[in-house]
Amino acid sequence: MKKMLLLGCLLVFLVGCAKGEPTITDYQSVEVGTKQEKVHKRFGEPDSTLSGLYGDIYVVEDKQVIIYYDFNEETGYPVTEIKTFDIVE
């Protein structure tokens, strides 16, 4: 019985560790209309924000993901578009 309990705990721990950092695919799976609050809960605070437009910038792998929002407080700032760019050095 103890072995089964230990194995179950180990499995839960490994599944939690496997989650890791979000990938490009995770960001691209965000649907238009998703509220900004939900994006922040899923991915955390952005690495940067846009100036002059309403959007968040996340750096993922070797890319920048920009999530644009509708600047409308009444609707919770829903996602309007997501773009991915290569980072140029």
Image: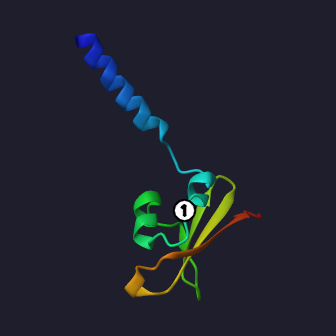
x 65%, y 52%: residue: 61
> Along the horizontal axis of the image, is 7 left or right of 53?
left
Q: Is residue 82 above or below residue 18?
A: below
Whole-percent x, y for residue 30 in the image: 54, 62
Count residues near mark 1 (Cα–Cα under 10 Å), then give few for <14, some for 14-19, many for 20+. Answer: some
Classify the position of the C terminus by image quarter.
Answer: bottom right
x 43%, y 33%: residue: 15
x 73%, y 63%: residue: 87
> Along the horizontal axis of the image, is 28 left or right of 35?
right
Q: Is residue 2 above or below residue 41?
A: above
Whole-percent x, y for residue 31 in the image: 54, 65
Direction left: furthest residue: 1
- Per the image, the residue denoted by label 1 is 30
Callout 1 secondary element: loop
Whole-percent x, y for residue 21 in the image: 52, 48
Scheme of image coloration: rainbow
Looking at the picture, tell me which residue is in the foreground, 86 or 73.
Answer: 73
- Tag count in the figure? 1
Image quarter of residue 60: bottom right
Q: Is residue 84 above or below residue 68?
A: above
Image quarter of residue 38: bottom left
Q: Is residue 27 above or below residue 4?
A: below
Classify the position of the N terminus by image quarter.
Answer: top left
Whole-percent x, y for residue 27 in the image: 57, 59
> Along the horizontal axis of the image, is 33 left or right of 41?
right
Residue type, mark 1 in image: Val
x 26%, y 18%: residue: 5
